[in-house]
Image (spheres, rainbow, N blue to C red):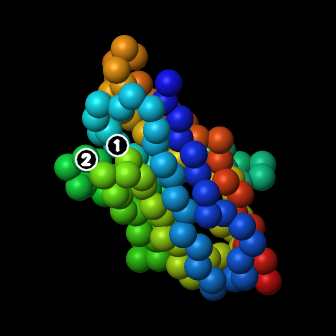
Amino acid sequence: QVQLVESGGGLVQVGGSLRLSCAASGTISSIYVMGWHRQAPGKQRELVARLTSGGDTFYADSVKGRFTISRDNAKNTVYLQMNSLKLEETAWYYCAATLHAEKSGVNEYWGQGTQVTVST
């Protein structure tokens, strides 16, 4: 059974920083893509950043230059360093991974989310 567990959310002031972590556990053979999505109140979930096993990255235009996604392959963990946070980035942040698990094949998995609140 595969699980994704996020951590690192919390309350931060405008302009502050947070680092989110997402650890994948279970009988994982390969992880192809890991990424972060977010959903603000009343809005649709959006892709924030994504990192492939080959090192290719994607960032939403709104976070380019401020957020950095990285990965520790040995720990099956992906990080999202968020700097210069804005009020409108208050949201639940969700980790997602496309991976190959033993007996399950290739699927997409989601974490339970971690809340980020940006305040004045």
- Within the image, what quadrant is residue 49 found in? bottom left
* Badge 2: residue crowd in 10 Å (few <14, some 14–19, many ≥20): few
Q: Amino acid at mark 2?
A: Ser
Q: Residue at x 61, y 63 (%)?
A: 8
In the shown orientation, is residue 96 left or right of residue 75? right
x, y percent for residue 104: 39, 16
SS for callout 1:
strand
Q: Residue at x 35, y 58 (%)?
A: 71
SS for callout 2:
loop
**Is 94 located above or below residue 67 in the figure?**
above
x, y percent for residue 96: 49, 42
Q: Amino acid at mark 1?
A: Val
Provide the residue designation for mark 2: 53
In the shown orientation, is residue 28 left or right of residue 37? left
Circle nearer the N terminus (1, 2):
1
* Badge 1: residue crowd in 10 Å (few <14, some 14–19, many ≥20): some
